[in-house]
Image (cartoon, helix red, strand yellow):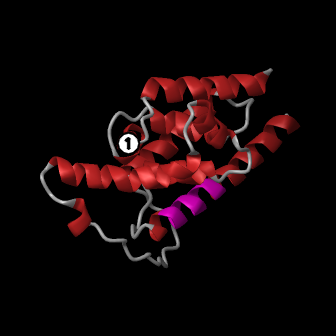
Amino acid sequence: MFKRLRLRIRDMKTISRLISEADKQAHKNGEDEPGAEHFLLSALLLSDGTARRVFERVGANPEQFQIAIKKQYSDALDAIGVDAAIVVEEPEPVTSNRMFHNSKPSGQAVMKSLYELKSHDKDTPLLGAHVIDVVAKMKHGVAARSFKAMGIDRESILAAVKDELDSLRC
């Protein structure tokens, strides 16, 4: 009983860190609300290190995900015949005075999926690898296109998540 209570408190702290950092990542990129990609960036900064190890398991540099986010935007512009170099400029950071957290639909989907995951698995802590798992299962959106820009396919990242989580259970 006490183990489960400690685990729940730990998970609440992890969620708080995820949300806080996702907001910072979004604001840094000129966006008011975080999306799935910002939650993934946030997961890469969690102290458990599992998200970073998942990227390393597929031979990807976790530091490159932010660059891949920018690349997927320029690739999209190129695909419709617009020179990204002319249009894309660095966004101004956003400051927010909101008291309550709000996310883009993809960010809301991440949080909902994490909640569902934890409602089925009450015996393991919420980790950065779990965030990658729910984000990688999204077939569309900025995060999916960013994985593609990095040359990471869904199957390999999901397999790496499974391997990482399995290695912790041993």
Residue 140 location (% of width, % of height): 32, 38
Residue name at image x 27 percent, y 49 percent? 75
Residue 156, x across and y down, in percent: 50, 25
Residue 78 vs residue 14: left or right? left
Q: At x 60% / y 48%, what residue is drawn?
A: 43
52 with respect to 82 (left or right) = right
Left or right of 65? Residue 16 is: right
Q: How far from the left and from the top, in percent, is residue 4?
A: 80, 36
Q: Is residue 109 left or right of residue 119?
A: left
What are the residue bounds of the magenta stretch?
17-25
What amino acid type should be assigned to the residue bearing mark 1? Ala
| Magenta stretch: dominant secondary structure | helix
Q: Nearer the viewer, residue 170 or 89?
A: 89
Q: Nearer the viewer, residue 77 or 24?
A: 77
Q: Which residue is mark 1?
A: 149
Residue drawn at x 42%, y 35% is: 151
